[in-house]
Image (cartoon, rainbow, N blue to C red):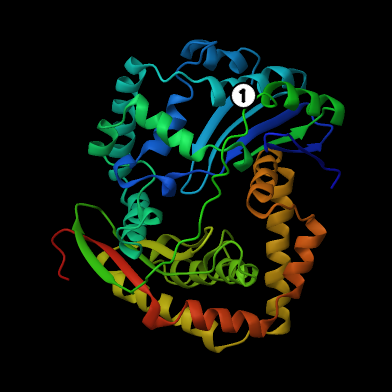
């Protein structure tokens, strides 16, 4: 990849990939998320994301929203457990406008008190909407169950009581403690020269004080498998089965990504989709997800089904997990699994917005960016015996936790 890498004296890093497209993308990724909140700050990281759009020393909310939308662009942001991002998509001639706007939002937001009070109601409505969707909320509750009383297990949105307690001071305290320039990466994919992007980067990010290095410290996690059922007023039963898994820096991570894809990845030919949906019609949606974090990880299998098929679906899932643990992939199966995940990665590379964020996250987390060829070599290096060892460890039945939302009125 023909990447431009540049680091400012204050520690903020730049990664840029030139393209010939008329549409460009850029953003800033900060190594701070909901897991970095103190208990009394629950929901603050996500609330900051909302408030960044509510006024700066240079602009009111309307002018922020209009700055790129007036020229057909889009401004967006997101918060995860470990990162916060502000990013934009726009016609390439509007690079100066986009870079300046992102810098203004990040470093000059004023958090007007009236806007804070108004946005509390918006976020509480967002929480209520989430609680109305058991297929989404069950993931949060599962993580809280697996990581009890631990920041990594808390929901990103917060709870209504904690959101109502947020103040301008609590927002500024979180930012002062976590938004270190050394833990920020500005990422860009678009048709702009190396000289121009570095000039814009230095102009709008170079005067920011260096501050303290707030690199996240690793935590230790005590995990005990647990199984819980809850009665809910839903049309379906919802179920998650999962286990803690490898962190972002574990060399076995690539093998687990492959296993997850084989088991219940995005392909319709995943083992769980074939077993539960295609062959038996037990579930409309069944999927497995592997989320690696800085110092831990989580593998979850989710499905929703009718009461009469709940027990049979759980048995089939355990059967597929047992098959991964006991039956090695044949040469053809292993080759097919590697080819599939390579194809997914290559297609994702063509999505320039996703690629821009991926480049930024890779530099932020690993301090390096692997080329597609390097990534493919890592995939090719995974052996069938390694996959069996990983499956035996991660999918050991005695290590799995289960959370079920059972239809109200059904027998447990």
Q: Is residue 162 left or right of residue 353?
A: left
**Residue placed most toward the observer, 123 or 239:** 123
Residue reaching furthest bottom?
Answer: 326
Residue 122 location in percent, x, y?
33, 27
Report which quarter residue 47 is drawn in.
Answer: top left
Q: Look at the picture and state if 28 lies above or below 337.
A: above
Whether residue 329 is visible here, answered yes or no, is no
- Please report the residue visible at 32 percent of the width from the left and 46 percent of the height from the top: 133
Q: Is residue 120 left or right of residue 3?
A: left
Q: Which residue is mark 1?
A: 103
Q: Look at the picture and state if 175 lies above or below 367.
A: above
**Residue placed most toward the observer, 210 or 185:** 210
- Please report the residue visible at 51 percent of the width from the left and 83 percent of the height from the top: 392
- Please report the residue visible at 57 percent of the width from the left and 88 percent of the height from the top: 327
**Residue placed most toward the observer, 316 or 260:** 260
Whether residue 113 is visible here, answered yes or no, is yes
Q: Quadrant where the C terminus lies?
A: bottom left
Residue 159 location in percent, x, y?
27, 41
- Please report the residue visible at 57 percent of the width from the left and 25 percent of the height from the top: 75
Q: Look at the picture and state if 68 lies above or below 26.
A: above
Residue 311 location in percent, x, y?
30, 74
Q: Secondary structure at mark 1?
A: helix
Report which quarter residue 370 is drawn in.
Answer: bottom right
Q: Is residue 121 left or right of residue 32?
A: left
Residue 269 location in percent, x, y?
58, 66
Q: How many marks?
A: 1
């Amino acid at each position: 990849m023909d990447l431009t890498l540049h680091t400012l004296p204050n520690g903020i890093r730049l990664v840029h990939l030139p393209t010939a497209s008329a549409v460009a993308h850029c953003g800033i990724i900060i190594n701070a998320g909901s897991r970095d909140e103190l208990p009394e700050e629950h929901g603050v990281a996500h609330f900051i994301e909302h408030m960044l759009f509510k006024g700066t020393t240079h602009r009111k909310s309307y002018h922020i929203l209009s700055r790129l939308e007036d020229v057909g662009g889009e401004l967006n942001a997101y918060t995860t457990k470990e990162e916060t991002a502000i990013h934009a998509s726009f016609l390439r001639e509007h690079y100066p406008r986009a870079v300046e706007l992102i810098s203004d939002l990040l470093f000059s937001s004023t958090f007007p008190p009236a806007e804070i009070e108004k946005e509390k109601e918006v976020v509480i409505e967002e929480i209520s909407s989430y609680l109305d969707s058991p297929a989404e909320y069950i993931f949060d509750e599962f993580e809280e169950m697996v990581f009890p009383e631990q920041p990594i297990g808390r929901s990103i949105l917060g709870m209504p009581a904690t959101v109502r307690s947020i103040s301008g001071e609590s927002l500024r305290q979180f930012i002062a403690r976590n938004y270190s320039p050394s833990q920020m990466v500005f990422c860009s994919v678009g048709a702009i020269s190396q000289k121009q992007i570095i000039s814009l980067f230095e102009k709008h990010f170079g005067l920011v004080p260096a501050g303290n290095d707030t690199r996240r410290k690793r935590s230790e996690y005590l995990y005990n498998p647990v199984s819980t059922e809850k009665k809910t007023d839903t049309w379906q039963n919802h179920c998650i089965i999962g286990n803690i898994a490898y962190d972002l820096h574990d060399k076995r991570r690539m093998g687990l990504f492959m296993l997850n894809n084989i088991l219940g990845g995005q392909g319709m030919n995943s083992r769980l989709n074939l077993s539960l949906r295609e062959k038996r019609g037990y579930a409309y949606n069944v999927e497995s997800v592997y989320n690696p974090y800085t110092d831990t990880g989580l593998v979850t299998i989710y499905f929703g089904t009718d009461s009469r098929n709940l027990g049979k679906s759980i048995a089939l899932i355990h059967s597929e997990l047992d098959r991964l643990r006991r039956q090695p992939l044949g040469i053809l199966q292993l080759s097919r699994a590697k080819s599939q995940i390579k194809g997914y990665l290559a297609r994702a590379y063509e999505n320039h917005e996703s690629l821009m964020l991926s480049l930024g996250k890779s530099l932020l987390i690993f301090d390096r960016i692997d080329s597609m060829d390097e990534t493919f070599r890592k995939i090719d290096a995974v052996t069938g015996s390694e996959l069996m060892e990983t499956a035996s460890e991660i999918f050991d039945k005695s290590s799995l936790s289960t959370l079920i939302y059972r239809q109200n009125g059904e027998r447990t």
